[in-house]
Amino acid sequence: MIRFEKVSYSYPDGTPALENVNLTIQKGEFIGIIGKNGSGKSTLALHLNGLLKPQKGKVVIRGMDTCDPSKLQGIRKIVGIVFQNPETQFVGRTVEEDLAFGPENLCLPPLEIRKCVDMALSEIGVEKYRYRSPKTLSGGQIQCVALAGILAMEPECIVFDEITSMLDPDSGTVVLESIKKLRRKGKNIVYITHNLEELHSADRIVVMEKGKIVFEGDPESVFMNSSLQNLGLTLPSLIELAAHLKTYDVKIPWEKIYSPHSFAEELCRLFLKM
Amino acid sequence: MPIILENVSFSYSKKTPLETPALREINLRIEKGEFVGILGEKGAGKSTLLKLFNGLLIPETGIILVDGLGPSSVDVRRRIGMVFQQAADQLFCRTVYDEIAFGPLNFGYSRKETNERVNEALEAVSLDPKMLHLSPFSLSGGEMKMVALASALALRPDYIVLDEPITGLDPDWKKEILETLKKERDRGATIIAVTHNIEDFFPLLEKIILIREGKISFHGSRDDYLKAGCLPLPPIASMMRELKARGLPVNSAAFNVEDALDEILRVKYVTQKESISNNPNKKLQHD
């Protein structure tokens, strides 16, 4: 579905941001991308729909090269990006207008545009904000509307660049629930974050450092890898506790580490059985 | 001298159809030198409370005293350093130097004294002096936050009041900010922070104020907070509390990985021992 072949990119001031990156993303996969600030995560995201073009190597989205200008519209219909500060991606006076912008830009007929907007509003459950100005919404609501704006273009792959970092926990949960729903519908999710706990159920996690992919694997193998902390990444405390317990022969299955509730349940099952 | 609030209430858009009560009958005493966390859900009134401390908002009813002075006193502004959630909202100067020097100059300190304070503040937040000549708006989110904090520190405030100081920052900057605050606390400053990042802040907090629907629903030490069964809790504390509720004899005051590990291993040892000493009996019964 998405293929990076030996991609390198440096910013105009000479800072290398990506170095020889090879990555394949399969259809329907939920991929988490983690790494310290400046490790190249966001640069990688911007390559996913041709906002940035590789200086070396190539990025191919379902057979279309992002360096081919004639393919860009097709690529942007497939891959949509939701940014950390969604205010920067609003263009409409009302939420409805904003949602219509994308499909209109793709030259869809008016009736079709209306359908896309209705679908996106109901999918994320933000119909009630339809006639509101995006400026009057709270952080979590804005993030949901930005997501709906991307959905209105019916992309197959949605890239999220640190979307929960400015949100309070409740709003974060609402946004994450919407993402889970999309995943169940078979959408490709590329999720960039500092909050490692949000990636507990990802299919695969890619760890970046200084523009390179240094490690990839399923969440359990990545999070339980001791070198993760050397990369300056902080493990969620329950996962850290589970990793320590494992060395004392107390094994908590991965799917139970997710919440304090399931963690406690498993410990009681282990200890009260003895 | 402490910060004292007596029967303080505040509503937004008072006497209009949009009137929204934010705080009701708040009674509070924050002692000097404490590290205080203000917790609560979105819209509970946390940020409103912060803005009352230095007179950015004036209460409808009640009295606020900071070291015995009313919050509209200019001296209170010098004693309370404020750092807002969006650092960019409080930065407005052409260079980082101007930004940090603005407060001291505004209070009439000499250029020499101001320069000393700028250097001292810059050192406290561990920023590179080369940065002084840059525009604050060319900096990263973490650096901007540090400049905002430095401009508050340049007044050598007795109280440092922060609204969501680490939200949106990456782990390295979070650590930097928390370490700076800890140092300021050790210097004798009172730190009052509104935060959702309970896991990061919890180890530092000495006192916790929990606000729910405009009222104080808890105010006390961190240990009492854990005992009182309040929410939110860091994940580890929440897990330990559940272990205890399910009948495992753990000390539910553990909230970090090390203490939780010790407790769980201790309980493992105890339950193992019990089960070994119980086994012979079971065997006898079976026989």
Image (tube, coloured by chain):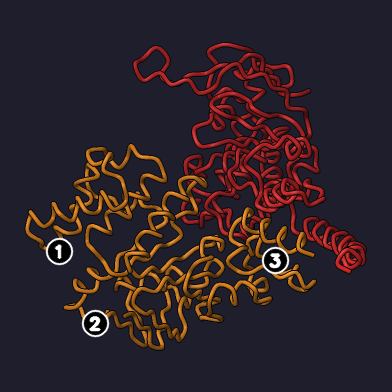
Chain colours: A orange, B red
Q: Are marks 2 and 1 on the same chain?
A: yes
Q: Residues within 10 Å of mark 2 (few under 14, many from 20)?
A: some
Q: Chain of mark 3?
A: A
Q: Is residue B156 visible?
A: no
Which callout, 2 or 1, points at the residue further toward the start of the chain? 2
Is label 1 in a helix, a strand or a loop? Answer: loop
Spot occupied by residue A233 in the image (x, y as percentages of width and height)? 62, 67
Which callout, 1 or 3, points at the residue further toward the start of the chain? 1
Along the horizontal axis of the image, is A163 left or right of B26? left
Spot occupied by residue A205 in the image (x, y as percentages of width and height)? 51, 74
Q: Are marks 1 and 3 on the same chain?
A: yes
- Disc 1 to disc 3, C-alpha distance: 48 Å
Q: Is residue B92 visible?
A: yes
Along the horizontal axis of the image, is A154 left or right of B134? left
Q: Is residue B265 above or below residue A251?
A: above
Total numbered labels placed on residues in the image = 3
Given the image, on which type of amino acid does mark 3 rest? Ala
What residue is shown at x 26% (from left), y 81% (from top)?
A62
Given the image, on which type of amino acid does mark 1 rest? Leu
Is label 2 in a helix, a strand or a loop? Answer: strand
Residue at the spot of label 2:
A64
What residue is shown at x 69% (from left), y 42% (from top)?
B117
Is label 3 in a helix, a strand or a loop? Answer: helix
Q: Is residue A56 above or below residue A135?
A: below
Spot occupied by residue B118 in the image (x, y as percentages of width and height)? 66, 45
Disc number for residue B14: none
Residue at the spot of label 1:
A106
Q: Quadrant of the N terminus of chain B?
A: top right
Which callout, 2 or 3, points at the residue further toward the start of the chain? 2
What residue is shown at x 64% (from left), y 27% (from top)?
B217
- Disc 2 to disc 1, C-alpha distance: 17 Å
